[in-house]
Image: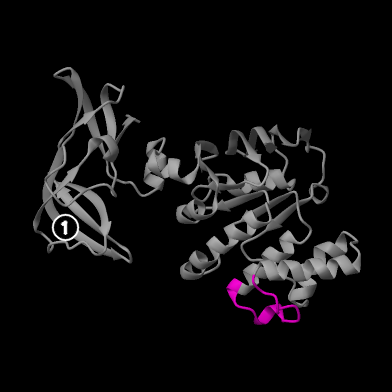
C-alpha cells in the first residue's frame, strides 16, 4: 500500500521552474529512485519531502495526513547525504547512537540498537573506532547505520555513494539494497547514475527539467524508454530521422541507413531509435546494415563499436569475447526490428 503520496508539487526559484506538477506514490518497504541529470529537480523534491523546503503548490501526504505544517524534525524521516556528515569528534558507536539519544531512548535499548545496526551494515567490531581513520566505504556504512538506527518512517538518501570511487560504489550498492530490504525500510534514493538506480531501486522516477519523463521498474524503463530524452539519458544514442510510409499493406520506416518494418501507429516524419545492445554480427536478421567499422572501445565485459552506415555513425555493444575485425573494415550486422527499434514522434 502507498504510504507516501506526492500530489501536484511545483517549486520555482525566481524565474527558474525547479519542479512542475510532480505526483507519485511510494509503497511501504519500497525503494524508489529519483533519477535524472544535474539540475532536473531531484534534490529539491527530496528537500520538500523532508520539510526543508516548502513547495509553491501541491501536497506531501503520509498515510493520508498532510505534512505541510509538520516541521522537518517531527516528520520522523531520516536523511543520508553524499558527504556522510559523520561527527569527527565522536567514535563509531557515538555517531550511530546520536539520533537515539536525541530521542531520549533508554540507554539499554540504545546499546542494543547500535550493536544491531553495526552488525547489519557489516561492522560488528567497529564500535570504538575513530571515524577519521575509516575508509570511504566504512564511513558510508556508519552513516547508513546512524540513519537507520532510529527506524525512520522514511529514509531519504541523496547521492549517498557519489563521493566514492566507481569500484567501491559497485560493491556497496548491492549491500545497500540488501540492507534496506532486510529491514523493510521505505526509502527514496536520489542519483544521477542510471546503473546505480537500476541496481538498487524497486521502481524509478526519471526526471527531466522538473518534470517526470517516465515511471517504472528498471527492466521496463531500460527495455522501453518512453521518450527521446529517456533513450539518450540511457545512452541509446542511435536516434535518426525517419519517415513512416505505407507499403504492401504494412508500414515501413524509411531512413538514411535502411528501411525498417514497423507496427508503429505514427505516420509521416518521426524519429527512429536503434538499440545498441540487440545487434548481431551476421546477415541473418530481417534488417541488415552494412558500413565501415570506425571505432572500438573496451568496456570491461563489453566492447562498444561505431559502425558508419552511409556517413551516419551508429553505436553497438557486444560481449568482450566477441571478435571484431580491424578498423576501417567493411562490416555487416543484422537487427530484428520488432525488438531493436523504437519509434518516437518528431520533436
On whether residue 4 falls in the magenta region, the answer is no
Please, which residue is most extreme toward the top here? 249
The kind of secondary structure element at disc 1 is strand
Examine the image and state in which quarter residue 200 appears.
bottom right
- Residue 64, percent across and down? 76, 32
Residue placed at 40% from the left, 39% from the top? 225
How crowded pointer 1 is (Cα within 10 Å; few <14, some 14-19, many 20+) is rated as some
Q: Is residue 322 above or below residue 12?
A: below
Q: Looking at the image, which residue is at 39% across and 38% down? A: 224
Question: Which of these two is toward me, 82 or 125?
Answer: 125
Note whether residue 273 is visible.
Answer: no
Q: Position of residue 34 (x, y in %)?
A: 56, 46
Residue range corresponding to the magenta coloring: 122-137
Residue drawn 22% across and 57% down? 305
Above or below residue 153? Residue 69 is above
Q: Which residue of the protein is positioned furthest toward the left in this rendering?
A: 330
Q: Quadrant of residue 302?
A: bottom left
Residue 135 within the segment the image draws in magenta: yes
Indicate the quadrant containing the C terminus: top left, top right, bottom left or bottom right. top left
Q: Where does residue 131 sit, x and y in percent of width and height? A: 70, 77
**Residue 321 x %, y %:** 24, 64
Label 1 sits on residue: 294
Residue for point 67% across, 74% down: 123
Q: Is residue 28 above or below residue 330?
A: above
Amino acid at each position: 500500500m502507498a504510504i507516501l503520496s506526492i500530489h501536484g508539487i511545483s517549486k520555482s526559484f525566481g524565474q527558474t521552474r525547479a519542479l512542475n506538477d510532480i505526483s507519485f506514490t511510494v509503497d511501504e518497504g519500497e525503494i524508489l529512485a529519483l533519477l535524472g541529470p544535474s539540475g532536473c529537480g531531484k534534490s529539491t523534491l527530496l528537500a520538500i519531502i523532508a520539510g526543508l523546503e516548502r513547495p509553491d503548490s501541491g501536497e506531501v501526504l503520509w498515510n493520508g495526513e498532510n505534512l505541510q505544517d509538520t516541521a522537518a524534525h517531527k516528520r520522523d524521516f531520516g536523511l543520508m547525504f553524499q558527504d556522510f556528515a559523520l561527527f569527527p569528534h565522536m567514535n563509531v558507536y557515538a555517531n550511530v547512537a546520536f539520533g537515539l539519544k536525541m530521542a531520549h531512548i533508554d540507554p539499554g535499548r540504545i546499546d542494543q540498537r547500535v550493536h544491531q545496526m553495526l552488525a547489519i551494515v557489516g561492522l560488528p567490531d567497529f564500535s570504538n573506532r575513530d571515524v577519521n581513520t575509516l575508509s570511504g566505504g566504512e564511513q558510508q556504512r556508519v552513516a547508513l547505520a546512524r540513519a537507520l538506527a532510529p527506524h525512520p518512517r522514511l529514509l531519504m538518501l541523496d547521492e549517498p555513494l557519489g563521493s566514492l570511487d566507481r569500484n567501491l560504489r559497485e560493491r556497496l550498492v548491492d549491500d545497500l539494497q540488501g540492507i534496506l530490504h532486510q529491514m523493510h525500510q521505505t526509502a527514496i534514493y536520489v542519483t544521477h547514475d542510471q546503473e546505480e538506480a537500476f541496481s538498487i531501486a524497486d521502481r524509478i522516477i526519471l526526471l527531466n527539467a522538473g518534470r517526470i519523463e517516465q515511471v517504472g521498474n528498471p527492466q521496463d524503463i531500460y527495455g522501453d524508454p518512453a521518450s527521446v530524452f529517456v533513450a539518450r539519458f540511457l545512452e541509446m544514442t542511435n536516434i535518426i530521422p525517419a519517415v513512416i510510409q505505407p507499403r504492401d499493406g504494412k508500414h515501413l520506416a524509411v531512413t538514411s541507413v535502411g528501411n525498417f518494418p514497423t507496427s508503429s501507429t505514427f505516420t509521416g516524419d518521426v524519429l527512429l531509435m536503434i538499440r545498441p545492445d540487440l545487434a548481431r554480427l551476421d546477415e541473418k536478421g530481417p534488417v541488415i546494415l552494412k558500413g565501415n567499422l570506425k571505432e572500438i572501445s573496451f568496456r570491461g565485459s563489453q566492447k562498444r563499436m561505431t559502425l558508419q552506415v552511409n556517413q551516419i555513425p551508429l553505436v553497438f555493444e557486444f560481449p568482450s569475447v566477441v571478435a571484431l575485425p580491424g578498423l576501417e573494415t567493411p562490416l555487416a550486422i543484422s537487427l530484428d526490428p520488432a525488438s531493436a527499434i523504437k519509434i518516437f514522434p518528431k520533436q
